[in-house]
Image (tube, rainbow, N blue to C red):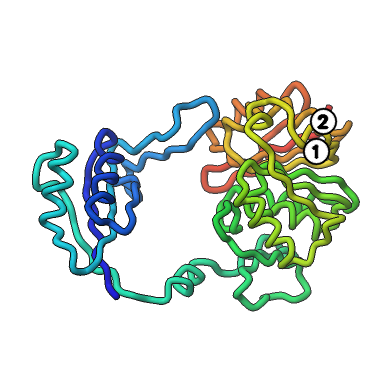
């Protein structure tokens, strides 16, 4: 069965209420995104600890999906009237044909070569190099498919720097990709921590796909207290290596917790940091680590350091 996709251009004041109005008028789903995405006017937004949540793009576009038989002109009139926008708004419609959505989604992910010996391989793909260290992954709902520059920066660092036998902490584990990589690269014990229960579920499933033993690799959910600088499961951890691929704001807030979790001469790798944020994050860790920019890729950096 085909559907109709209705996209309406609006602003940050009306985007959310317009989305709600379209749902009330029978939309099957709605989506908010940057109307200037892919142009010089694109507005990057990131939820950072300590900043207001729920920011919306100044130039927003609301996309709603309707049954093919929906009366789009009537819906447009009712929605704009409900939120106080002039009629007609700037909009477009697109016919969305039925297709195999699972296959369409899977087609977006292909095996990624991180290094000569390390690959990220979606679970439905054939392994390109059976002799390599292959991270078998189902992306699921958690961050960490291997395609993002920050994930690749961290994976390459683990590949180059793990010597084998280390105790590793992956804070903000997402899909579990970094923790699984550490385990398969020879770490003695790996713990992945995340505040999102869906991330923990995805990590555990991916751990099973990679045949990692629970004795070597474990995942735990931690609460908002640890995220905000309080206590949590991490306080009982002492690690030789810490990797955290999150965002700049949370990394700064988490500095006391991550520093406490390091042993003498432990190494740390931090990513999810834009180039212009690197110095601020580095300054937060400089009292405890000889922190520096190790790599940069597509505007993202990897900070690394050894406990002093």
Residue that label 1 marks = 267
Asked which quadrant contains residue 73, the reply is bottom left
Q: Relative to residue 168, is residue 144 drawn left or right? A: left
Q: Residue at x 68, y 62 (%)?
A: 205
Answer above or below: position of 243 versus 76. above
Q: Relative to residue 34, is residue 84 drawn left or right? A: left
Q: Residue at x 58, y 53 (%)?
A: 142
**Residue farthest to the top, as pictured:** 287
Asked which quadrant contains residue 279, the reply is top right
Do labels 1 and 2 touch, CB within 8 Å? Answer: yes
Viewer-closest of 234 and 169: 234
**Residue farthest to the left, as pictured:** 87
Residue 251, image x and y in percent? 63, 32
Could you tell me which secondary element the residue under label 2 belongs to?
Answer: loop
Q: Residue at x 67, y 25 (%)?
A: 229
Answer above or below: position of 24 versus 70. above
Quarter of the picture containing the C terminus is top right
Viewer-closest of 27 and 269: 27
Quarter of the picture containing the N terminus is bottom left
Q: How many marks?
A: 2
How far is disc 1 from disc 2 in space, using C-alphas? 6 Å
Viewer-closest of 281 and 96: 96
Q: Which mark is residue 307?
A: 2
Residue 181, image x and y in percent? 74, 57
């Amino acid at each position: 069965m085909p559907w109709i996709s209705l996209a309406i251009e609006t602003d940050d004041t009306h985007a959310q209420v317009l989305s709600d109005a379209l749902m009330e008028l029978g939309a099957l789903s709605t989506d908010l995104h940057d109307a200037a995405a892919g142009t010089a006017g694109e507005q990057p937004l990131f939820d950072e600890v300590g900043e207001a949540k729920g920011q919306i793009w100044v130039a927003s576009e609301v996309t709603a999906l309707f049954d093919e038989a929906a009366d789009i002109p009537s819906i447009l009139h009712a929605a704009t009237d409900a939120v106080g926008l002039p009629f007609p708004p700037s909009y477009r419609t697109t016919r969305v044909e039925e297709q195999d959505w699972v296959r369409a989604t899977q087609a977006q992910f292909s095996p990624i070569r991180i290094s000569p010996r390390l690959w990220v391989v979606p679970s439905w793909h054939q392994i390109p190099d059976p002799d390599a260290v292959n991270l078998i992954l189902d992306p699921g709902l958690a961050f960490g498919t291997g395609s993002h520059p920050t994930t690749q920066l961290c994976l390459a660092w683990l590949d180059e720097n793990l010597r084998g036998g280390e105790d590793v902490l992956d804070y903000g584990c997402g899909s579990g990709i970094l923790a699984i990589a550490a385990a398969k690269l020879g770490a003695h014990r790996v713990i992945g921590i995340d505040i999102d229960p869906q991330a923990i579920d995805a990590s555990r499933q991916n751990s099973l796909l990679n045949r990692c033993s629970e004795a070597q690799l474990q995942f735990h959910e931690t609460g908002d207290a640890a995220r905000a600088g309080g206590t949590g499961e991490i306080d009982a951890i002492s690690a030789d290596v810490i990797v955290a691929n999150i965002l700049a704001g949370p990394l700064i807030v988490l500095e006391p917790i991550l520093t406490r979790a390091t042993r003498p001469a432990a190494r740390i790798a931090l990513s999810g940091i834009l180039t212009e944020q690197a110095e601020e994050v580095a300054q937060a860790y400089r009292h405890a680590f000889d922190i520096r920019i190790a790599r940069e890729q597509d505007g993202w950096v990897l900070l690394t350091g050894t406990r002093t």
